Image (tube, rainbow, N blue to C red):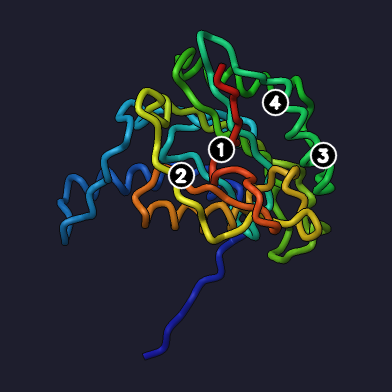
Amino acid sequence: MAMCSTTFPFVFYDLLEQSLPFYNMLKRQIRKIRGPQQPPLSDPPLPVPANKNILVWVGDELLPRNSAKVSVFDSVVQGGDAVWEGLRIYDGKVFKLDEHLDRLFDSAKAMAFSNVPTRDWIKDAIFKTLIANGMFNNAHIRLTLTRGKKVTSGMSPAFNLYGCALIVLAEWKPPVYDNSHGIKLVTATTRRNSPNSIDSKIHHNNLINNILAKIEGNLAQAEDAIMLDKDGFVSETNATNIALREQL
């Protein structure tokens, strides 16, 4: 039996792209009405249920959690090529915002990002995200600046011709550690990157070493894993800095 196919008329491509979110929403509703053919996987419980309905800044707009996505051509998908900062919100203020943005821009410069948004534009995106979510305390922001979308897949930054993409992911997050009783730590066998190989001052999204160390910590049922440098000296944990305070 002969099969016939029709080439998609690309004159309608922009219309298709704009219509897809609405189409997918309708398709989900129809599935609910008809009933599933097989039991779907249930959504796992969230650590903080209130985060189910958050709005996330992606690119230049706020989107609902389930619609917040980046292109498959974005550099963060291909090689994890992005820089990031973790921000905490206390009593209506972003803790050391300018210092974090300084490091974000330093990292972007070290990675030769082009068309980087301005400081004021990034601040505006942060504040709009917090206000839209009503987050003024006990919140955390994962601020990510990707190298942006590529015109074709590949490693070379020469393919990144669209400019950087900003992601402001704000969530309700209570303190991670129980400081009243201390926490359990283990020393990971995975070492911190040597400055001779990769400068750890660059806050890059590709955190393979840290993830491997965290896996070791999870297997040992510890809250975090201490990472040593190449010479065996204490560097940091997989997720936080280490500071010593003299007890008087």
Residue type, label 2: Asp
Residue under pointer 4: 122
Q: CA distance from mark 1 to mark 3?
A: 30 Å
Mark closest to the chain's N terminus, 3 or 4: 3
Residue 176, above or below 126: below
Tell me the tag on residue 115.
3
Marks 2 and 1 close (CB-CB < 8 Å):
yes
Q: CA distance from mark 3 to mark 4?
A: 13 Å
Q: Position of residue 202 (x, y in %)?
A: 74, 44
Residue 74 seen in the figure:
no
Mark closest to the chain's N terminus, 2 or 1: 2
Q: Residues within 10 Å of mark 4 (few under 14, many from 20)?
A: some
Tell me the tag on residue 240.
1
Mark closest to the chain's N terminus, 2 or 3: 3
Residue type, label 4: Ile
Name the image quarter holding residue 101. top right
Q: Secondary structure at mark 3?
A: loop
Residue type, label 1: Thr
Tell me the tag on residue 224.
2
